[in-house]
Amino acid sequence: MRAVRHTSETNILKLIKPLFLDEFWREFETIKARGLTRGRAPLLKEFHKKLSVLRFLDPACGCGNFLVITYRELRLLELEVLRTLNKTGESFIDVDQIYGIEYE
């Protein structure tokens, strides 16, 4: 029997933040900084839609930590977008966007 090993959350964040998460947060902050008087709401809605069509695949997911952390971090970003839009309950990010394959 093989010992189950998984990648730590710290190491996962070291990978996904520079890979895509930091850029999404920068884009969100740029849109948010526009202010209400300069058409921020349509841009936030467009950004929210952009997040909803993303797909992630871990071809060797094992216990799925990369996928779980990715999903959690995207949901946290989405919640900030929704708070900024003053909306509740209109979630577009779904666990069905996350895919994994494990040989064993």
Image (cartoon, grey):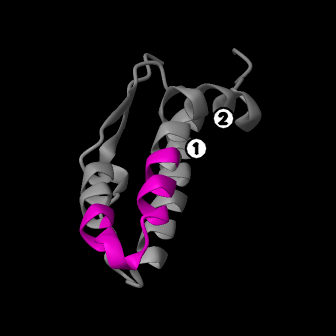
Q: Position of residue 28 (x, y in %)?
A: 45, 55
Residue sitting nearer the eye, 33 or 9: 33
**Where is mark 2, residue-wise?**
13
Query: How far is the residue under mark 2 from the one under mark 1?
Result: 8 Å
Measuring 72% from the left and 23% from the top, which residue is drawn there? Answer: 5
Measuring 28% from the left and 53% from the top, which residue is drawn there? Answer: 52
Q: State which region is magenta.
A: 26-44
Measuring 27% from the left and 50% from the top, which residue is drawn there? Answer: 50
Q: Position of residue 30 (x, y in %)?
A: 46, 53
The amino acid marked with disc number 2 is Leu
Q: Position of residue 43 (x, y in %)?
A: 28, 62
Is residue 28 within the magenta segment? Answer: yes
Disc 2 secondary structure class: helix
Q: Main secondary structure of the magenta part?
A: helix
**Where is mark 1, residue-wise?**
69
Other residues around mark 1 within 10 Å, as few (<14) / some (14–19) / many (≥20)? some
Measuring 49% from the left and 38% from the top, which residue is drawn there? Answer: 23
